[in-house]
Image (cartoon, helix red, strand yellow):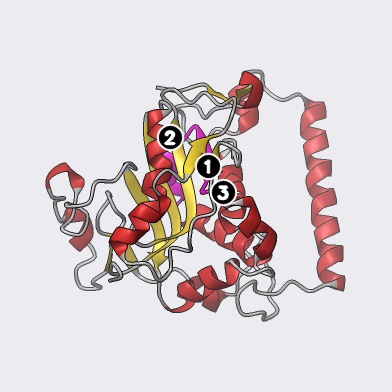
Amino acid sequence: MNAEVHGCGNTPVPTSSGTLGETPAEMTSSNPPSRADLGRGVVARWCRRTWLAAVNLVLPPRCAFCGVDIEPEDGEPLLCETCNRLLVPGWRLGCRRCGTLVPQVPEQPEFVASKPLPPAGRCLRCRRQPYYFDGVIPLGPYRDELRQAVVRMKQRTGDHLAGTMGELYAQRRANEVAAFRPDVVVPIPMHWSRQMVRRTNSPEILAARISRHLGVPSEGAMLVRRRNTLPQAGLPPTKRFENVRGAFRLGRGYAIKDARVLLVDDVLTTGATCSEAAKVLRKAGAQIVLAAVVARTDQPRA
């Protein structure tokens, strides 16, 4: 079912269609493009390539993670070959429910795909913990280079890296996310006072890049953090759920009945923050909520 997601003032927001791979232009018009339209498209692409070539000549592009000079290909994340490989190691999704990751066994590449899911799609890690989201798609485990990337994304100078990680996520997890057929992309909101201190908002940047690849809107005002909660880092699992309880509300003027929502955050540990945000979305009428995160911790922290 395709939902109609309304934004502030009940203004309709374009939603995704049931056909994967359609561009926004294809979804809004069934008429073939004219020769003039095609010509303008060719000129626009030529101008863009020329402009990028001139900029790259003056300011050579560098890897967003390690800083080495690179020769980027059109549409590719600004990462060198080494960092591109290190930031997405050979891990595969083990539990579709909570996103717990398991290493890929080279001798048994079919291990994860053929391993049956437990009842209700839950693994031992999340079977005892109720979540309001329906699944998690992580880019990789919160360790090594990917952990460094997440930490740097949260810093004042992390906007460029956050955008690149959003591009990388959209590229590497394109099939899994597109199969979900989201109507809208929603970042985990940051309290205004914390954003003033950080001067950046990595979930919002990630959501914008992912939504652009999907061709669906990113609604950064759909969820509002009503109070400035304590930082989750350092809190035990039970305290993390208590810390964010009641911390979110739906933004004014949004109607999301039967919507398929892609909820975006940088890292998921216990799942408390994403679950509490998903709770608000589900109570507002969302049909299904899927969490898209850059990193998933290996083990719950005591």
Q: Is residue 185 magenta?
A: yes
Question: How far apart are the two marked residues, 3 and 2, measured between alpha carbons?
Answer: 16 Å
Q: Are marks 2 and 1 in contact (CB under 8 Å)?
A: yes
In 3D space, how far apart are the residues under numbered discs 1 and 3 (Cα atoms)?
A: 7 Å
Which amino acid lies under the numbered mark 1 shown in the image of this protein?
Val
Q: Secondary structure at mark 3?
A: helix
Circle nearer the N terminus (1, 3): 1
Work out how far the residue at label 2 is from the one at label 1, CA to CA, in angstroms: 10 Å
Q: Residue at x 64, y 26 (%)?
A: 8
Question: Which three-letter amino acid code belongs to the residue tagged 3?
Answer: Ala
Secondary structure under tag 1 reads strand
Report the span colored magenta.
173-188
Choose mark 3 or mark 2, whichever is in front: 2
Q: Earlier in the sequence, mark 2 or mark 1?
A: 1
Viewer-nearest of discs 2 and 1 = 2
Mark 1 residue crowding within 10 angstroms, few (<14) / some (14–19) / many (20+): many
Residue at mark 2: 281
The x, y position of residue 66, in whole percent, is 61, 80
Contact (Cβ within 8 Å) of mark 1 with mark 3: yes
Can you give x and y, in whole percent of width and height, for residue 22 in the image? 55, 32
Q: Residue at x 19, y 50 (%)?
A: 122
* Residue type, label 2: Leu
Q: Secondary structure at mark 2?
A: helix
Residue 3 x/y as whole percent: 47, 22
Report the residue marked by disc 3: 207
Q: Residues within 10 Å of mark 2 (few under 14, many from 20)?
A: many
Q: Quick one: 207 or 61, which is closer to the camera?
A: 207
Q: Which residue is mark 1?
A: 186
Residue 137 is tagged as: none
